[in-house]
Amino acid sequence: MTTTPSAAAMPEAPAREPDDALAGFRLDAHPMPGDGAFGAFGGSWIPEILVPAASRIAAAWADARRDPEFLAEYAHLCRMFIGRPTPLQDAPRLAATASGAQVLLKREDLAHTGAHKINNAIGQALLARRLGVTRVIAETGAGQHGVATATACALLGIECVVHMGAHDIERQHPNVERMELLGARVHAVDEGTRTLTDAVSSAIREWVGDPDGIYYLIGSAVGMHPFPTMVRDLQCVIGHEARVQCLELTGSLPGAVVACVGGGSNSIGTFMPFAADAGVELHGAEAAGDGVDTPRHAASIVGGRDGVLHGARTMLLQDADGQVLPTHSISAGLDYPGVGPEHAQLAASGRATYHPVTDDEAMATLELVCRTEGIIPAIESAHAVALGLRLAAERSADETVLVTLSGRGDKDLATIAAYRAGRV
């Protein structure tokens, strides 16, 4: 007979952790806008029924991000459960293919569950417990956020339901099996494009049905206030560590920092700890699919315009009437028509630059990473590496390009095989 363990109190964090790249990390290192606005973007464009719940979460996060005990527990789980800090790896054979700058890879693929998503899931699950919520829902595209949320909820003894597009279930089925093994229920969304956009919409509808009893654990830096700020704060552990590690490894900051951008969680977490460093360029790789000059892409900054999506004003792909357009990317995690509002502001201000990377360029780079560095990256991450190599080729050997490798490619093996066989 199989039994389900009851929720147990987490062991207390030790009074002092070992010194490492996590030292000095703060959840309140960057401003939390009271109204959720990042310049002209952000805010809370939500049904009235959700306003009290969103306000309650915003107040709880404003308190938790300044609470030394909350930070101590989060940092403890980062170290002892997630396995942080993740390494910053020199990639000389990969860099040699660009004949330019040194390339460093921030190895989020080595975090527990295989991607950066666990950083956010653990933090928000702790907040859900702090709020006294016993049921968590989430959306997922590539499945990594779903797995991370199921993992965090299993650890803390919280019921978990994950909304996932039926098309993504087909192309990311191993992650569905992981979620179910961890005790989560996967809700298939068989409408619209049957991908991440529809999974988000489905999760919001469930939340509207019980806003007081459900905590919606959003996986990217998108949506209504306070989620873009909260996800950024939790994912900034990536950039904080990378900054410390780059200084230790090279004696200076990188000339360019690169990450892939769908909704934008790994990228905003990578970028913000470098945002005040005027000499560090910030570059985001968007999914160009078959090309931004075709209808089959998901490059919402490069090919989109200002509008409202899933509760926030941001940049998104839409037609002349403001209707959200269908998207395409070989990467399930980048197949989303919008971007986080803070990314929209970084683009509008010129602080960060966003570039299209096609399916073909990403897949060629994926194989290159496999064969030069012995790493099978997620297809999402291959977009970032492709852009990183472009930028490295434009720089001299004494410069450094830092690329966040957001996840590992185990989940993508079926898609990779299909692409190599010409079936995608």
Image (tube, rainbow, N blue to C red):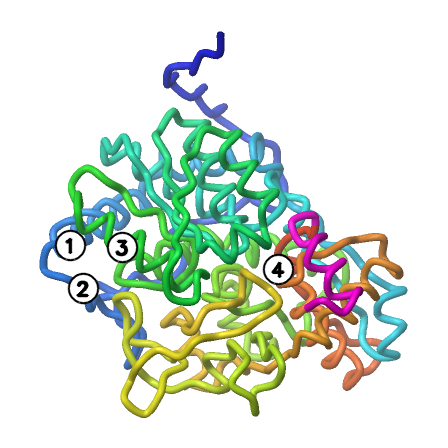
Query: Which of the numbered marks, if any, corresponds to residue 46?
Result: 2
Classify 10 Å Cα crowding around label 2: few (below 14), some (14-19), many (20 and above): some
Q: What element carries label 4?
A: helix
Residue denoted by label 4: 243
Relative to 149, 97 lies left or right? right
**Which one is earlier in the sequence, the residue at label 2 or at label 3?**
2
Kind of residue at badge 4: Arg
* Spatial CA span between label 2 and label 4: 36 Å
Task: Single out the mark in the foreground, 2 or 3.
Answer: 3
Type of secondary structure dominating the magenta stretch: helix
Q: Is mark 2 on a helix, strand or loop?
A: loop
Q: Are the residues tagged 1 and 2 within 8 Å (C-beta)? A: yes
* Mark 1 → mark 2, Cα distance in angstroms: 7 Å
Residue 39 is left or right of residue 289, and the answer is left
Q: Residues within 10 Å of mark 4 (few under 14, many from 20)?
A: many
Q: Which mark is residue 50?
A: 1
Q: Are marks 3 and 4 in contact (CB under 8 Å)?
A: no
Disc 2 from disc 3: Cα separation: 10 Å
In the rendered view, tell whether residue 227 sits above or below residue 81.
below
At a point 68% along the width and 70% down the height, the residue shown is 254
Please, what is the three-letter code of the amino acid marked with disc 1?
Answer: Leu
* Residue 81 in the image, given as x and y percentages of width and height: 56, 32
Give whichever of discs 1 and 3 has the lower sequence position: 1
All told, the count of numbered labels is: 4
Disc ID at residue 204: 3
Q: Which residue is drawn at 50% across and 23% down?
A: 14
